[in-house]
Image (cartoon, rainbow, N blue to C red):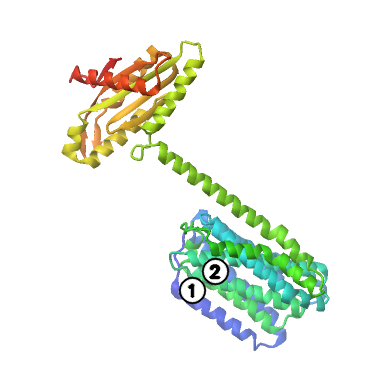
Amino acid sequence: MRIAPDRRGAAAYVSALLVATAAHGILPEPARPAWFFAVSVAILPSIVLLILRCPRGYRQSWTVLLTAFVFLSAGNGVRVVFGSSEWMMLGESLVTVGHTGLFLSALSLVIQRGRRDPGGLIDAAVVAMSGGGLLWTCVLKPRSASLELSTGSQIALFVTVIVLAGVLGALGRLWVTSQQPMPALHLLVYALIAALVGNTALALSTGSMTDGRPVWAEMLFLLAYTFVGAAVSHPSAVDLARLGTAPPDRLTTTRLALLGAAVALAPAVGVLRQLRGYSADGLLMALAVLGIVPLVIIRIRALALERERAEHALMHQATHDALTGLPNRSEALDRLSLALDRERAETSSMGVVVFFCDLDGFKGINDRLGHAAGDLLLQQLARRLSTGLRSGDTLARYGGDEFLIVCAGTQQSEARTRICRHLDEALAVPFDLAGHTVNVGASIGAVVSDRISGAHELVRRADHAMYEAKQRRDRSSRVTVALA
């Protein structure tokens, strides 16, 4: 079932969330837990409606987001139902799972929409994670130590900051490279920023995600919830999970410098701390090895694959005809030479047969209907001839309306019969050229290898035989063959 978005209803819904966020700051303290819980629950219907609006293949990210808010609401509900500190551990665990779900939802969107830009996403994530590491070393690490947070709490805070920074960097890349307005994406970025600030400030002020939260921190979380509600209510949210366009991905000097600085940041900070008499941050050093370096390796691997694809494309362009996609003259001669070398090395009766084919009536069609029609005829004929050839056969466009067929590793008499029949069947069906139905014939020169002549000599003899076939062509026959 697909549900159309209600713009007025969405505007009223977001306005209500903003009012609820502002009102939270003036409520009496006993009423705040229930109010906070109610606002978090109010986000759920908007996510459900978005899932129903999305096609089935684009619901994964939003389903993860819905699950995350279920856990967040459950964690907030613990404060309302139980209220005692002995239940706070359960509430914090549920909230932590919910925050993890938020990260996974954002990461899923990044992967789903940015599959055509892996290099750019990795670059943005690496630089952002390095910035998050610097924030941890200069601000968050000293503060967490002064609060005497447990090692587990520090690791949880560190991972939260680094992962969220990486996801924000990737989302920022999607924002910058998007070729169409995506307000839903912008709102999600704002939501993650508010969540990052709220989580960091809350953990450093109280050391707890649920117990004893100051009202300003709760309002930051409610603001993040409001941004999420606005994002999923916006019509552009339906298109957010669709595959985005592939932006230019040039590894410029500036981008290389940023990547190098990002990789070198962690060890550089460690060296500076040692020089100033402080202990090196082992957690940050581990980040460089376990977080950023693998991403850089993936980036380098992606560049290597891209280069391989480019080299393959260049090789294909150099050896194949651009119009028909068939091997060109140079490639055909190379393959023929290899086939002749293999033939000379063997003693079996298998051999090489070369067919030189020239179309009859093609020039008249080209002159009458134009070059575009002639090109279309060549493309259609190439597809017909390619279908039904054996693995040892090579079909090439030799030039103009001339085709070369090389049959290697075959009984020579059988090859002549098979190829002539194949050509006759390919030409039996008229060609439809943009509404014009035409027929063409073919004159074929065939030559059997003598295990002595080279590739150029065999082609020359086949070409000569083709002209003999053309001179004695019977206009009632589609195919005329002459043997050299």
Vertical comparison of 387 with 453: above or below: below
Label located before the other in sequence (1 or 2): 1
Please give the label number shown on residue 190: none
Q: Quadrant of residue 374?
A: top left
Label 2 neighbour load within 10 Å: few <14, some 14-19, many 20+: many
Amino acid of disc 2? Ser
Q: Position of residue 302 (x, y in %)?
A: 57, 51
Q: Determine the CA span between mark 1 and mark 2.
A: 9 Å
Please tell me which residue is depicted at 23% across the width and 41% down the height of the picture: 371
Q: Position of residue 81 (x, y in %)?
A: 74, 74
Asked whether 349 or 30 is in front, the reply is 349
Q: Position of residue 395 (x, y in %)?
A: 38, 28
Mark 1 sits on what residue? 10
Asked whether 434 or 396 is in front, the reply is 396
Mark 2 sits on what residue? 46
Q: Quadrant of the C terminus?
A: top left
- Asked if one can make out residue 70 in the rendered structure from this viewpoint, the answer is no
Amino acid of disc 1? Ala
Asked whether 119 or 203 is in front, the reply is 119
Task: Tell me: 350 left or right of 161.
Answer: left
Please tell me which residue is depicted at 69% across the width and 88% down the height of the picture: 28
Name the element at disc 2. helix
Q: Position of residue 34 (x, y in %)?
A: 68, 79
Vertical comparison of 188 with 394: above or below: below
- Callout 1 touching callout 2 (CB < 8 Å): yes
Label 1 neighbour load within 10 Å: few <14, some 14-19, many 20+: some
